[in-house]
Amino acid sequence: MIISEWVGASRGLGYLILLALGRVKVDLMFATTIALAVFTLLTYALVDRICRRWLDGPSGPA
């Protein structure tokens, strides 16, 4: 998703990273990258929790 924003978007985190890079705003680039990493970890944790709940079923692990 970030790569697609780099290619043709005019909004979003990927676009903001490229904008900061082009204007040599290193602090903005790192802040955006850290925000992206946090969102990635939260999404991973959410999907992991949903998958574990779905795969364990209503009776729990065996």
Image: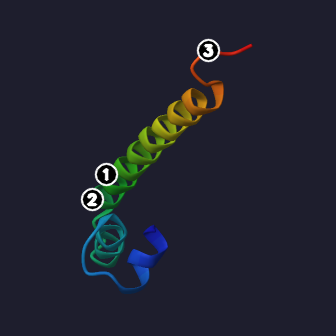
Q: Position of residue 25 (x, y in %)?
A: 27, 66
Identify which residue is drawn at 57% across, 32% down.
54
Q: Secondary structure at mark 1?
A: helix
* Coordinates of residue 17 in the picture (x, y in percent): 35, 67
Determine the CA span between mark 2 and mark 3. 47 Å
Depth check, mark 1 against mark 3: the one in front is 3
Q: 61 or 1, which lies in front?
A: 61
Classify mark 2: residues with Cα within 10 Å, few (<14), some (14-19) or many (20+): some
What's the amino acid at mark 3?
Answer: Ser
Quadrant of the image for the C terminus? top right
Kindly identify the residue that appears in the image at 32 percent across and 73 percent down. 15
Asked if marks 1 and 3 touch (Cβ < 8 Å), the reply is no
Sequence order check, earlier mark of 1 and 3: 1
- Tell which tag, 2 or 3, sits nearer the viewer: 3
Could you say whether the residue bearing mark 2 is in a helix, strand or loop?
Answer: helix
Give left or right: position of 20 versus 61.
Answer: left
Relative to 33, say whether 52 is above or below.
Answer: above
Residue 45 position (above or below residue 37): above
The residue drawn where x is 51% and y is 34% is 50
Q: Relative to the observer, which residue lies in front, 1 or 46?
A: 46
| Coordinates of residue 13 in the picture (x, y in percent) | 32, 64
Q: For mark 1, what is the residue?
A: 31
Is disc 2 in contact with disc 1, using a CB cutoff of under 8 Å?
yes
- Where is residue 53? Give x, y as percent: 55, 27
Disc 2 target residue: 28
25 displayed left or right of 50: left
The N terminus - image quarter: bottom left
Rounded to the nearest angstrom, the CA distance separating label 2 from label 1 is 5 Å
Q: Amino acid at mark 1?
A: Ala
Q: Secondary structure at mark 3?
A: loop
Q: Badge 3 is on which residue?
A: 59
Q: Amino acid type of disc 2?
A: Leu
